[in-house]
Amino acid sequence: MTEPRALDGRREAPSANLLLLSNSVGADGYIAHALDAIRTWWALGEAPGEAVFVPFAGVVRDWDAYAELVAGALERLGIPLRPLHRAADMQALLAGATHVVVGGGNTFHLLYELRRRGLLAPLADRVRQGHCSYLGWSAGANLACPTIRTTNDMPVVDPGGFDALAAVPFQINPHFTQVHPSGHRGETRLQRLQEFCALNPDVPVWALPEGTGLHVGAQGMRVLGGPVFLLAGDGDLRQVPEGPVAATVAARR
């Protein structure tokens, strides 16, 4: 995956720094395909010290084991990881966080845990104000959107509403595929997303195949890891190549 490019290392004011990935598991190991992009994301953040890891998307996955897995992967980049669930005061930890990493799993469970612990609004404020860099994959990428309504996950728990961080003005569908297995009679992923667009014509949806992602920063948005797809308005599927995203494309309705 190509790393997001910084034009200048200086920052006069906080600015957005979000890395939103489709997936974590790849042929070369856990988040190995995204290490270059993560390295730059880390360097672009405000005064990097440690990254706070949010494991709440894990349902059958033990949160301690999940944190250890992610810590081992990020250790290769020299990024220290602090699990949010182990903190005595989670709100205080988030209030001072410069980097937050949100892992994948079940998006409904992730949102449920954040909301019931009183962490959703503080995290949203910190990320939206540019005081905290944000890295999320799969469910973690969904969480950055206005709502979680384009997740692929089963609603295993009622999250108390679909509103999420609204750190970006669009929706994401991770793990996007156009594969239609022989004999499958249900709707395709594309048809499901077109249903969303029909009811929400003013909300763009970025569909991210495996190995791809988006970086949103002060210099705009970049597609990472290969072409992705954009749906909006009439639900037509438009391929967007790797590299900088033109403002007219990013704002498409």
Image: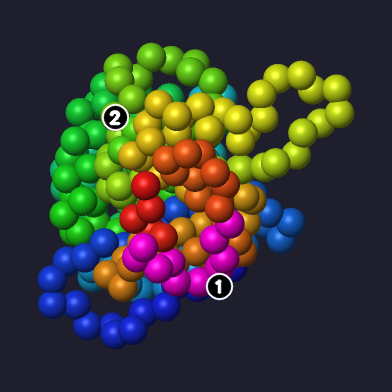
For this orientation, the residue located farthest to the front is 234
What is the number of the mark on residue 2?
A: 1
**Relative image position of residue 242 (x, y in whole percent):** 55, 68
Residue for badge 2: 163
Start and end of the magenta stretch?
A: 239-248
User: Dividing the image into 4 quarters, which one contains the N terminus?
Assistant: bottom right
Judge left or right: residue 241 versus residue 15: right
Residue under the point 58% across and 57% down: 239
Residue that appears at 45% across and 34% down: 197
Q: For the residue marked with disc 1, what is the amino acid?
A: Thr
Where does residue 46 sit, x and y in percent of width and height? Answer: 23, 68
| Residue 88 image position (x, y, % from top left) | 23, 36
Residue 246 inside the magenta-drawn segment: yes
SS type, badge 1: loop
Q: Is 63 displayed left or right of 96 in the figure?
A: right
Q: Using the image as rendered, state which of residue 137 and residue 228 is in the foreground.
A: 228
Q: Look at 50% across and 50% down and name the residue there.
A: 230
Residue 191 on image: x %, y %: 60, 30
Most distant residue in the left direction: 13
Viewer-side residue, 93 vs 28: 28
Q: Is residue 77 above or below residue 198?
A: below
Mark 2 or mark 1, which has the lower sequence index? 1
Considering only vertical position in the picture, is 211 above or below 187?
below
SS at mark 2 in the image: loop
